[in-house]
Structure formats: structure tokens, C-alpha cells
Amino acid sequence: MKFHILPLCLLALALPALAQEVPQVTLRFISFPKTTSPQPVELLLGEGETLEVKIPTNALSEPYKVKRLSTWAVGKLEPAKSEDEKPAFNSYGSAPALASSEQLILLIRNGKENADGMRVIPLDNNTRNFGGGQFFFMNASKVDIAGVLGGTKFALKPGTHTIIKPTETKKRKGAGSKLFFTEFFFRKEEEARPFFSSSWPANEKARSMVFFYHDTHNERLRMHTIRDYIP
């Protein structure tokens, strides 16, 4: 019996330490459509437990370290109506979490207010998967979008997204930086119509997010771009 005492004692000491080692994930948030004063939301961490997070529209939020969960749900924790009830979580939207330890949570509002509901899109925020020189395109419009980005072609149905990187760049005259040609089209009936073309600077220290959407005031097709510089 004495032979088993030492291993059992060591196991008893190790269990509390193991219980404290909860895997953590770093989350950053961004929301769309753009607004001048985006209101924060609460991230559900467990029963009756939430964390208020900022959801800017022109830059990525500050990083939040949280325990790893199988689902990311955002909303608001409503206070209990009586002593017999528990606070209820009013979910605006949710999505399965990724395995990555660095995740970017894209929140797309269904209406003007957060409470109108949100589409939650987790993205792998590891710079090996979404890094410098790459572009994330999200088609939040009502029409098919196609484009050419530095020699790379892509097409997006409404509600879909992709990450691509230009493959063809050229030296800018009189400068050391490079440029690449970009052009976007939208489908009207069976015809592809161009609505934007330009030469963009290639920057391996920055990654970009581009949203295509229809302006709610005049229904014109527009584009919203966010650039995130990598240290």
C-alpha cells in the first residue's frame, strides 16, 4: 500500500493546477454596416456570464482574451424579472467557433440596431492565414460581384466572402513601392457591368477588408474598405 501513496499524493496536487489551465482564445471584433457610434455587445461566456466587447466599423477592436468555447454568441444579458428567475441572455446571433487561437469575429447587422439581429462570421485571425498583402472581400450587397485584383480573379454571390492576394504587381514610376490594377463588376440581368477600377499600392505590412453593399439612402452599390497594419 505504501508504494501507491506517493503517486496518489502527486496526482492530488496536480489536479487543481490542471483545473486552472483553461485554454484561452484571443478575439477581435469588427462590425458592418459602418456607423459613427457603434454600440458594444455582450459576448456570452457561460450561464449568466458575459463580457462587453466593442465592435468598431473602421478598425479592428482591441484584443479580448477569453476561454475557448464551441460557440460564439453575442447579445445582451437581461436582468431577472423576479428573485425566482435567472438573468436571460437575449442572443443577437451566434456561430460555431474556430479551432484557431486567434479569431476575428465579423458581425453584420440585419438592421440599424444591434438588437435587430446579427450574422456572426468567425475568421482565422492568424497572420499566416490572413496576413500582409491579403484582401478579405465580403459581398453584403444584393447582386453578384466579380473582380480582378492584381491578376487574380474572383466572384462572390450575395452573403459570401473570400480572401485573396494580388499576384501581378508593377513598380511605380519614380518610387520604390509597387502597384496592382483592380477592377470590380456587378451583374445586372446577364450582363457584367464595371463600377470601380483603380491602381492600389501593394503593402506587405497591411491587410485589408473590403465590403460591397447597397447604400440604404439611394440603393447605389458602394464599397467600404478597412486597412489593418501588422506590427
Image (cartoon, helix red, strand yellow):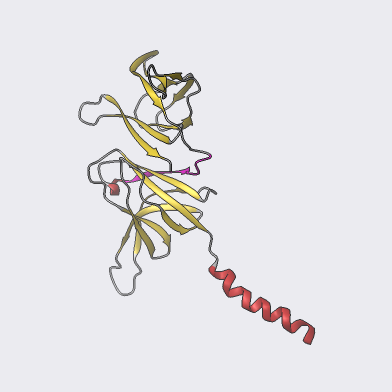
Residue displayed at 31% across by 75% down: 83
Residue 226 as seen in the image, left or right of residue 125: left
- Where is residue 90? Give x, y as percent: 34, 56
Whether residue 1 is visible to the viewer of this picture, yes or no, is: no
Q: Is residue 92 above or below residue 35?
A: below
Q: How many marks?
A: 0
Residue most extreme to the bottom: 2
Rendering quarter of residue 227 = top left
Q: Quadrant of the N terminus?
A: bottom right
- Where is residue 74? Give x, y as percent: 37, 52
Q: Is residue 192 above or below residue 200?
A: above
- Magenta-drawn stretch contains 119: yes
- Where is residue 179? Give x, y as percent: 41, 21
Q: Quadrant of the C terminus?
A: top left
Whether residue 113 is visible to the viewer of this picture, yes or no, is: yes
Which residue range is magenta in the image? 117-128
Rendering quarter of residue 88 = bottom left
- Where is residue 103? Give x, y as percent: 47, 47
Residue displayed at 39% across by 25% down: 201
